[in-house]
Image (tube, coloured by chain):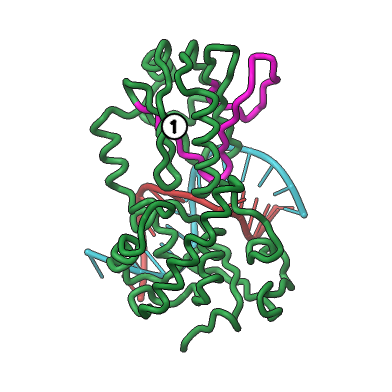
Chain colours: A green, B red, C cyan
Amino acid sequence: MPELPDVEEFRRVLDSCGRRRSIRRVDVRDGGVLHDMSPRRFSRALEGRRFTEPVRHGKLLLARTGGPTVLLHFGMTGQLVCDTDEDPEHPHDRVVFVLGGGRRLRYRDQRKLRGLWLLGEKEETEWLRSQGPDAASAGRAEVRAALRGSRAGVKSALMDQTVLAGLGNLLADEVLWRSRLDPRRSVALLSDEDHRRLYAALHGTLGPAIRAGRVPPRGNWITGHRDDPAGECPRCGHRLEHARVAGRGTVWCPLCQPALS
DNA sequence: TCGAATGTTTATCT
DNA sequence: GAGATAAACATTCG
């Protein structure tokens, strides 16, 4: 599920639930989500600290504490939930931060594809350096410069977190559909006009999605039609194409997004 | 039982 | 060295 807009929603959850609250206890229910760290060390490093202002970059969420930083990556099924001591356990709660004021912040994840890291300053810098510019805050020139280094297909480049951070499979399809670009086209061969439309589409897509806290399954977005094998383009009514591009299930409109030989 | 699922890493081709 | 591709990670769902 989580792409940039979802993670931004989790950042808001963390901020409103955790900021300035003390971490009373860290309850690791499943140590399998902790990387390079025993549950014991993880808990000890955090108990007694307070969360400060959280930061998001792409799909990464950094929970700062004034000491070590918790890096949260949500994989495909992770979420961050804020509730109270009264609320029931969920079988997929992997790490529970017991906070002051009866609040609980839960890292909940069914598939455990990614997880949590505890980072020092240096490691934090390294993580951020491995990422391209954040897709929501990068300006037009920055996006273009990021894409310039790639000769891959445009969908592959958009989803590559080291090129541009934040887009996943759904957002990439949505942005390409709005840009009228075939997902298989080479990013190196895009025209100035293509880049202009790509940037406009990026912001036209991310803005409402961030406000909604997710990629909204609206009927006038291509995302709302991706599960229908006979789906029609919400713009022109042509039958949508379904295929694997860049290793992922991809939906596009062959009429609006011509292959260009 | 098989395949696919909104993510990433790793190995292996081309 | 790129880039593309497939498998792997763990789990659920159709």
Question: Numbered disc 1: what chain?
Answer: A
- Horizontal and vertical percent for residue A7? 51, 42
Residue A81 at x, y percent in the picture: 60, 30
The number of discs equals 1
Residue A26 within the magenta-colored segment of the rendering: no
Question: In the rendered image of this protein, does residue A47 appear above or below residue A9?
Answer: above
Q: Quadrant of residue A45?
A: top left
| Magenta-span inclusion, residue A95 | yes
The region drawn magenta spans A69-96
Numbered disc 1: secondary structure: strand
- Note whether A175 is above or below A237 in the view shown: above
The residue furthest bottom is A261
Neighbour tally class for label 1: few under 14, some 14-19, many 20 plus, Cα within 10 Å:
many
Residue A75: percent from left, percent from top? 51, 43
Q: Nearer the viewer, residue A114 or A65?
A: A65
Q: Hey, which quadrant is residue A160 in on the image? A: bottom left
Give the residue at x 49% y 48%: A4
Residue marked by disc 1: A116
Q: Check the image and report above or below for A27 versus A7.
A: above
**Camera-side residue of A92 and A65:** A65
- Which quadrant of the figure has residue A188? bottom left
Amino acid, disc 1: Leu
Kindly identify the residue that appears in the image at 63 percent across and 23 percent down.
Answer: A83
Judged left or right of residue A107, residue A165 is left
Image spot of residue C5 (x, y percent): 46, 67
Q: Is A246 left or right of A164, judged from the image as shown? A: right
Q: Residue at x 33, y 53 (%)?
A: A132
